[in-house]
Amino acid sequence: MKKNSLYLIFAISALSLCGGCKKQEAMPADAEAADSVISLTVWSGEEDEALLQEIFSSFQSNYAGQATFQITLQPQSESGCKDALLADLENGADVFTFADDQLAALAAAGALDPLEDPDAVRTANLPASVDAASVGNTLYAYPLTADNGYFLYYNKAYFSEEDIQSLNRMVEIAAEQERLVTMDWSSAWYVYSFFGNTGLEVGLNEDGLTNYCTWNSTEGPIHGVDVAQAMLEIAASPGFASRTDTDFLAGVQDGSVIAGVSGVWNSVAIEEVWGENTGAARLPSYTCKDQQVQMASFSGCKLIGVNAYSRQKEWAVRLAEWISNEKNQTLRFEQRGQGPSNIRAADSPAVQASPAISALLAQSEFSQLQRIGGKFWDPVSAFALNMAGGNPSGASLQEQLDRLAEDVTAR
């Protein structure tokens, strides 16, 4: 009875307190939601900061009245996203940009859940980008670009259309002009170009983790040592330099570089320097064993992922969809020169008229979707940097290639 009496007293007191007050109306659900603060962390490349801040602003305006947002952008390279996220998945970013070759590992680790509305994503995006965002037939991420490849930039003031068909000829011209043609041999991603169309192979085994590699082969029309010798001949010219992407752009800006291998992310900056002389084309051929070999390339897409452990999963999904929608892919192209995966954005006259996008499409005939295990990168980089340095130790090229193949295929 004592317990029941206390409840009764409380109820009467509450009614008495309210009796002299105006009637309080219930707060609308939207108002309650608007008072909540949704905190989201986004990882993306530092170079996208200005673009993403504009996208975040439009996102908040679109959902004004439904919530108050605190969106934090943290710099994280797409290439290193997987390792950073898996190091502390539960405290990782809610939304993140990453290269498509990391998708399988992220999905296998439980970092990504299948998309809830995959048909809408499939309908809106180019088939190749949908494939890149899928494991089997399951979509795990939102396509963001369809341009993660590379091609040739050149200054038309120095090269003719015929000149750019041959890397060796371009290097000769650069030497005559006391300028440079550059390519990043510290990156195995670019070095694949020399091996990709030779009959020598590298790729991912069925286990999804280990690689096969025949770059050291002594059979077939072109041997591994033939490619290595061709690289040494290019590196020996004063018209060539192995430079990182950042150093390539710096060379364009200071006038020392008149051609180089890069991607669409540098198109805006290069056009600012070269203006109407900006040229872009598929990769040239190079001389190997007295024949011309068309240079190959890796291709891929940038994707947007939503952390399966996000504490604000619903809003994280909405933000990922917003970043990757048609309007914002168009904005990304306008500001960063990156090729859209969205079909309608990719079909726009501006995108179709872009020299960089046209060059990427021309190179696509000689490209391969990047599907490589983690043991590929360091051995190839070490080998190529030694070629760029002229093989100063004089070590056997065959022995170096044998060691490369052994390390690339290690289990």
Image: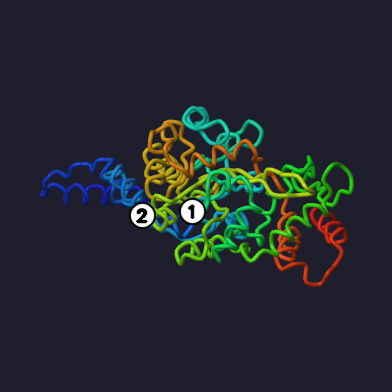
Residue sitting nearer the eye, 92 or 157:
157
Q: How packed is label 2: few (under 14 Cα within 10 Å), some, or many (20 or more)?
A: some
Please indicate whether residue 360 sits to the left or right of residue 295 in the image.
Answer: left
Q: Answer with the quarter of the image where residue 370 lies.
A: top right
The secondary element bearing badge 1 is classed as strand
Q: Which amino acid type is marked by label 1?
A: Asn
Q: Above or below — where is 137 with respect to 103?
A: above
Which residue position holds label 2? 53
Write the residue at 76% across / 62% down.
383
- Can you tell which mark lies on residue 155? 1
Q: Position of residue 351 (x, y in %)?
A: 42, 38
Q: Position of residue 20 (x, y in %)?
A: 10, 49
Q: Which amino acid type is marked by label 2?
A: Gln
Farthest-out residue, front: 176
Residue sitting nearer the eye, 96 or 160:
160
Q: Position of residue 261 (x, y in %)?
A: 58, 53
Q: Position of residue 193 (x, y in %)?
A: 68, 49
Q: Answer with the quarter of the image where residue 48 lies.
A: bottom left
Residue sitting nearer the eye, 14 or 401:
401
Q: What's the distance in space between the residues labelled 1 and 2, CA to CA?
A: 33 Å
Which of pointers 1 and 2 indicates the residue nearer the eye? 1
